[in-house]
Every structure is written in C-alpha cells, then in structure tokens.
Image: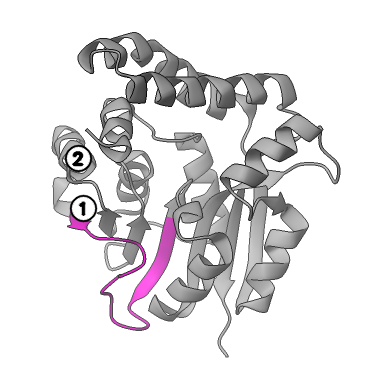
Amino acid sequence: MDDLSLLASLHLDGDRQGPGGDAQTRRAIELSGLSHNPSLKIADIGCGTGASTLVLAKALGAQITAIDFLPSFLERLQARATALGLAELIRTELASMETLSFPDASLDAIWSEGAIYNIGFERGVKTWRRFLKPAGILAVSELTWLTDARPDALEAHWMAQYPEVATASAKLAILEKNGYTPLGYFVLPEHCWLQAYYRPLQQRFATFLQTHGSTEAAKAIVAEEELEIALYERYRAFVSYGYYIAQKTRR
C-alpha cells in the first residue's frame, strides 16, 4: 500500500481531515454575505469526508458540488449527507482540483477548507477565479504565520512541508493582486486544531497501525503526524490556519 492509500486510511474515519469547525464555517458564510438561497451554486474543493460541505448545505440550502480525488472520502460524505437528509443538495465529483470542469462564471462561491495547499495558494486563487460569477465568493482556510518571526524549528518544518506558508498580510496581498477584494479574515482558534482534529487523529493511531501490520511506512506516517502535533502544541502562538473570505472583482 502506498503512502497516499495509507493516509486515506488514517483519515477516512475522521469527521475532519484538517483543523476547522462548524462554527468557523458558519462565520465565514456570514462574512461572505451569502444567505439561504436554493438557487446558489457552490463548489467545495478538496471536501474530504464533508465537514464543510454539510454545513454549507444546511446553512444555505444551496446546490453544492463536493470535489475530492479520493473515492473513499466521497463515499463517506454521501453516507453522512444521506443520514442528515441533505443528499439532494450535494453532488459529489471525483476530480483533481487542478482539472475542474465547471463552465466559466458559473459558480456563486468556491469553498476550500484546509485543502488549497495541494495546488498552492496563489495558483489556486488564480486558477479558480474564472469559475466564479462576477462578485462571486472565495472562502479558503490556509496555513498562516501569526507573527513576523518564528522559532527556527517551527519555521524549518513548515517551510519544508509547504513553502507558501506566509503571514496574513502576504496572503491578502495575493488575493488583491489576483482580482479579489478581501471581505474578511480570522484565525482558527486552538480547539479547531486540538479537539476537532488532532485528538481524534491520535485516538486512531493504534487501530491504524494494527490494521496495517505496523509496517515501516505506516509507522513513518504516524511519526510525521506526531511531530506535527508536538510542534503545534509547543508553538501554537506562531502558526494557525487563517480563514480568508474574498469577492471576485468585476474587472
């Protein structure tokens, strides 16, 4: 089993595949200016098992296209949507975020919580812009430095993992440069990392290792996750996810 399959196995049973919270998704909706409207067309890109998708569908009553490249995640999302009575509002699509098939200017909003790093922040906001209608909404959460200077160990780790990590001011400048007007920004609180993501993840480590025979590859993945958790617990004042809400300019 390759590393991608192992990662999918580790994260499949999680309500979330990254830091976040239902209240934070609702706050982003409020900052976006969107309200309940069944005619809205929204894409949730890199949806995972659907934490944000389900909140969007319930809050807005809109048609949501939930996109991920892992079939198992989409199957779990469909099951969750059915259990909540939201299946009619959600269409899943197996696709890469780099090869989206939406017509130009067809979406009222694009959401992507903790996933845009897969394509890169600047490439993502630039590439996806054409799919938005005039004045369409972009809402993404993205790894963000909270201070101008950071401990060396933390900076070395995240620069190796994701060189586009930057301060909020740098991210907002990228949005403005690429044809967006920022509408709002906030930082995910600690409980979105610890209670919502890391603690449930830690509880799955033992079962994950047992399922995969404690292979070296499986143990390496757990070790990487444990390092990330330890760094966050020690240096949480310096890094988080920033939630960015912006509107496509009419130019």
Look at 20% across and 58% down and name the residue there.
93
Q: Secondary structure at mark 2?
A: helix
State whether residue 144 appears in this view. yes
User: Residue lying furthest front in this view?
Assistant: 216
For this rendering, which residue is in front, 155 or 216?
216
Look at 64% across and 25% down and name the residue there.
232
According to the picture, the residue beneath numbered tag 2 turns out to be 81
Q: Secondary structure at mark 1?
A: strand
In the rendered image, residue 102 lying in the magenta stretch gets the answer yes
Residue range highlighted in magenta: 89-111
Q: Dot 1, how many residues are within 10 Å of its Cα: few (below 14), some (14-19), or many (20+)?
A: many
In the image, 168: left or right of 100? right
Q: Are marks 1 and 2 in contact (CB under 8 Å)?
A: yes
Residue 30 location, x and y as percent?
53, 52
According to the picture, the residue beneath numbered tag 1 turns out to be 90
What type is the residue that disc 1 sits on?
Ile
